[in-house]
Image: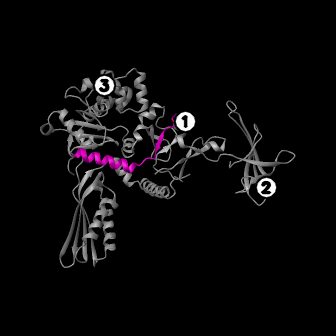
């Protein structure tokens, strides 16, 4: 198995509230209103809350009725995880132009390995500028540069939107010492215990003997102490793009009908996507080779506009090619190759395999299309959401409310 | 419930579901509903029809918001002649009758 590339110098690219930013990017005017995103599960609770909504007292985890009670002008958005995942994959692809060592964290958080990039871009400030250049147009990112992922993440979390914090080599310990303990990967209980002990900053934690922290908090405490003291430098670990993935189908009798060929193509794509080497990667380029009766051959080499793990999106341009420039004869063997890949995310893989999420996304699209049709014909909205207001109320008219459905 | 859709919801355009509708009710000597009077469609409220109450299936009382604007209602689930089921309530503060799906 090829060794994964690593880099101890790290640039952290962080876009807080990434899913909410994705919604704001595609809906004009949303950014100027208090907005909240519902959780992708069926709990109907708030997942992410914009700063304006937070200012009105709305918090993640609240129910819709609680949030509306606090902020009557709140705009609620249904989540679209597949879209967020696509946006994040494009961000990772853009970062890949700067460095081959990219590690994805949660949605909106990525690390760029910058070892040896001084020769290409220059100083850390210039490296950060180059990263900012490739992502600036679409997002307002916070950037941090330091040795190790943790210090770079802390630096990014301290940066103002659209700005960067650079921690010079050797300055990590001093930089970390003044940071609050909340930057550590803590569970709420450990956080509370540290605060009860009067430990508010990483410097105070690092000043304690390592053994004492380990005795009090166990292995977790030891890890936290080492992070706080700057002793742990976790490198950025990039992925290795897989070798081309090939799936082939030999026909017992030569096939000339386009329907049959398209069905065979669907099967090949499904088989290739299931290959374990593809996990964590989106398909960027694809090649379809056909062996035609009489020793001839046919080839379609395509670069996908957006890297994808969606079978239909991979199939669509190949089917168009089959339609527009079909092979000159019946086909005896069809070979599909996934030839280039772009990094994906853990979330991507979850969402891509999450049939429920995919089905919900499909239903939403169908519903939106139907609603637009109705609106066009009748000139007004005739569809409504039913939302819970006070489902516990003894007065029936208080339990639910209707709200216009606008696609 | 309508299947959730990925659209922005505006809380300022909420409209209540299942709001009570005022009805005229004929009462018996015990003050229990005997018939419901409804306006005929397209009559501008001039003509009415009466739906006779065949049986009172259930009755309950709600007292709420006594600390603000007291709400006191007595609900009746009634069976109408012909088989329809309707939920009525009398607002014990104003004495007006309403129909509502409980």
Q: Label 3 neighbourhood size at 10 Å, few (<14), some (14-19), many (20+)?
A: some
Q: Which of A249/A384 is in front? A: A384
- For image coordinates 76% across by 46% down, the residue present is B59
* Label 1 vs label 2, nearer the camera: 2
| Residue A86 covered by magenta stretch | yes
The magenta region covers A69-96
Where disc 2 sits, the SS reads strand
Asked whether residue A113 is in view, the answer is no
Q: Do badges 1 and 2 share one subunit?
A: no
> What is the spatial separation of the Cα atoms under label 3 and label 2, in whole angstroms?
86 Å
Classified by dominant secondary structure, the portion drawn in magenta counts as helix
- For image coordinates 25% across by 25% down, the residue present is A173
Q: Chain of mark 1?
A: A
Residue corresponding to mark 1: A69
> What is the spatial separation of the Cα atoms under label 3 and label 1, in whole angstroms?
48 Å
Q: Chain of mark 3?
A: A
Mark 3 or mark 1, earlier in chain: 1
- For image coordinates 45% across by 35% down, the residue present is A53
| Residue contact between numbered discs 1 and 2, judged by CB atoms under 8 Å | no
Q: Label 1 neighbourhood size at 10 Å, few (<14), some (14-19), many (20+)?
A: some
| Residue A280 covered by magenta stretch | no
Left-right relation of A2 to A314: left
Q: Which of B31/A357 is in front? A: B31
Q: Do badges 3 and 2 share one subunit?
A: no
Residue corresponding to mark 3: A210
* Label 3 vs label 1, nearer the camera: 1
| B88 lies above or below A314 | above
Q: Chain of mark 2?
A: B
* Label 3 vs label 2, nearer the camera: 2
Q: Position of residue A333 (x, y in %)?
A: 24, 73
Circle on res. B50: 2
Where disc 3 sits, the SS reads helix
């Amino acid at each position: 198995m090829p060794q994964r590339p690593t880099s101890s110098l790290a640039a952290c690219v962080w876009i807080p509230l990434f899913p909410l930013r994705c919604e704001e990017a595609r809906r004009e005017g949303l950014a100027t209103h208090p907005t909240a995103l519902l959780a992708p599960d069926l709990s109907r609770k708030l997942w992410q809350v914009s700063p304006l909504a937070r200012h009105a007292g709305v918090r993640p985890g609240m129910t819709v009725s609680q949030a509306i009670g606090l902020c009557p002008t709140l705009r609620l958005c249904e989540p679209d995880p597949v879209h967020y995942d696509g946006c994040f994959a494009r961000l990772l692809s853009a970062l890949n132009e700067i460095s081959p060592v990219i590690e994805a964290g949660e949605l909106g958080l990525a690390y760029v390995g910058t070892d040896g990039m001084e020769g290409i871009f220059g100083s850390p400030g210039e490296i950060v500028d180059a990263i900012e250049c490739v992502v600036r147009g679409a997002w307002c990112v916070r950037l941090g540069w330091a040795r190790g992922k943790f210090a770079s993440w802390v630096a990014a979390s301290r940066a103002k939107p659209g700005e960067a914090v650079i921690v010079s080599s050797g300055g990590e310990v001093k930089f970390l010492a003044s940071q609050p303990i909340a930057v550590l990967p803590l569970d709420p209980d450990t956080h509370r215990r540290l605060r009860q002990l009067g430990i508010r900053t990483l410097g105070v934690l690092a000043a304690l003997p390592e053994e004492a922290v380990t005795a009090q908090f166990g292995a977790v405490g030891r890890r936290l102490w080492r992070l706080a003291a700057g002793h742990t430098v976790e490198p950025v670990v990039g992925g290795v793009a897989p070798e081309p993935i090939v799936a082939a189908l030999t026909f017992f009798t030569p096939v000339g009908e386009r329907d049959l060929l398209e069905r065979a193509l669907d099967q090949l794509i499904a088989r290739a996507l299931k290959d374990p080497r593809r996990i964590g990667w989106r398909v960027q380029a694809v090649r379809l080779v056909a062996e035609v009766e009489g020793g001839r051959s046919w080839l379609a080499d395509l670069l996908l506009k957006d890297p994808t793990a969606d079978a239909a999106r991979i199939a669509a341009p190949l089917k168009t090619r089959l339609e527009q420039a079909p092979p000159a004869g019946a086909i005896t063997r069809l070979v599909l190759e996934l030839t280039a890949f772009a990094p994906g995310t853990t979330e991507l893989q979850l969402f891509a395999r999450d049939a429920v999420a995919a089905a919900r996304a499909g239903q939403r699209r169908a519903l939106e299309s139907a609603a637009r049709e109705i609106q066009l014909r009748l000139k007004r909205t005739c569809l409504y959401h039913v939302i819970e207001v006070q489902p516990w109320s003894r007065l029936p008219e208080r339990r639910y409310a209707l709200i216009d459905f606008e696609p | 419930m309508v299947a959730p859709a990925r659209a922005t919801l505006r809380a300022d355009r909420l409209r209540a579901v299942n709001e009570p509708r005022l009805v005229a009710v004929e009462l018996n000597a015990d003050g229990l509903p005997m018939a419901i009077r409804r306006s005929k469609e397209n009559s501008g409220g001039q003509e009415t029809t009466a739906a006779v109450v065949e049986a009172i299936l259930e009755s309950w009382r709600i007292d709420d918001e006594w600390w603000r604007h007291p709400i006191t209602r007595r609900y009746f689930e009634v069976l109408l002649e012909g088989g329809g089921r309707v939920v009525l309530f009398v607002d014990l503060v104003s004495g007006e009758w309403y129909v509502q799906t409980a």
